[in-house]
Amino acid sequence: MVRTGSSAYLKYGWEATYGGTVTIDKKFGLQDSLSSWTLTHNRQDLPALNQVTINDYAYGQQSGSIGIDFTLSNPWIFKAILGDGSITGSSDPYTHTFPHASNGINKTPITFACEVGFDDTTNIVRTLKGCVADSISINTSVGDLVSASISANYGKEDAPSTTLSAPTKPLVAFPYTFAHAQLKWEGSVVAQVQDLSITIAQNPALLYGLNSHQAVDSYRQLLDITGSFRASLVDKDVLENMLEQVKAGTSSGTYSETVGGSPELEILFLKETGEEIKITGTGLAPTDLSWDGIRPNEPVFENINWRIKSIVVAAKNNKSAAE
């Protein structure tokens, strides 16, 4: 029988140690799905003298990759890259801040395990261990939901089992849409934004050792935070940002390493007072600026790609602890 997503579930849980025992019971978000999934054992083909066919196979590292898409509905997944958050507030609303307000970003990756189950004539349950997020991306456009995706690599997968257990739905589960989104650039709200995106990448790698074909650990590299937005052309602010960073600005005419302003960059997803997800960036610099073109009777849009040095995600909700 052909299997469909209606017979499957996906859930995850945070690992205390790489690939160790963990409780797997969480949903990534609303409308979660696996967009890609690959497992390889890095086979090596061994030829031999005096023949043109392969003589033997040898097998190397076990490694896999997954892509997960979902509708942004809570802040908990930011832990995968920014580490454990800190919690402030003595009553509703509580503020969950990633990374931790005192400890900062973990210098070692936070890993998680995923379980994918198929409930059908023959149950199949696969458990992926030592998953480390490569990146988290968030984007929205006029008329759309706020979509999120996470790409991850993993280095351990055991033999499949048949015991099914569906995930627990988070209590904080609001489907954010474009109508709940707001963008600030250089301290001011950007008007008539058509779409925006942000990607937080930690560029991790799996570590292997002798005597095991599975990964034994992981490590992270430089944090890379980039994004883009498309908005109606209403002023020359972004153009001046571009020019001033090569010491030729039309306003001050002096060099400026970053855009400045307070906040330099802010992406806000607001449900209501007391429930929101706010992303704040510092060290903002535009990467490039383009216009879609200038045509009779058509609006002119500008497209801006940018990078920031550091990030803080502050989420307000009624939970005194992360779900």
Image (spheres, rainbow, N blue to C red):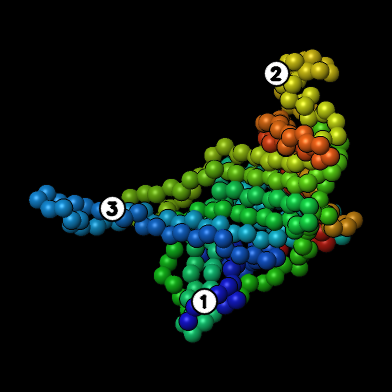
The residue indicated by pointer 1 is 3
Label 1 crowd bin: few (<14), some (14–19), many (20+), radius 10 Å: few
Residue 197 or residue 233, whichever sits in front: 233
Sequence-wise first label, 1 or 2: 1
Label 2 crowd bin: few (<14), some (14–19), many (20+), radius 10 Å: few
Q: Is residue 170 visible?
A: yes
Sequence-wise first label, 2 or 3: 3
The x, y position of residue 213, in whole percent, is 35, 56
Residue 2 or residue 119, whichever sits in front: 2
The residue indicated by pointer 3 is 44
The residue indicated by pointer 2 is 246
Q: Residue at x 79, y 24 (%)?
A: 240
The x, y position of residue 177, in whole percent, is 78, 57
Helix, strand or loop at mark 1: loop
Q: Residue at x 56, y 60 (%)?
A: 35
Helix, strand or loop at mark 2: loop
Q: In terms of image quadrants, where is residue 170? A: bottom right
Q: CA distance from mark 1 to mark 3?
A: 32 Å
Q: CA distance from mark 2 to mark 3?
A: 50 Å
Q: Residue furthest right?
A: 273
Left or right: where 123 falls relative to 302 = left
Marks 1,3: beta carbons within 8 A: no
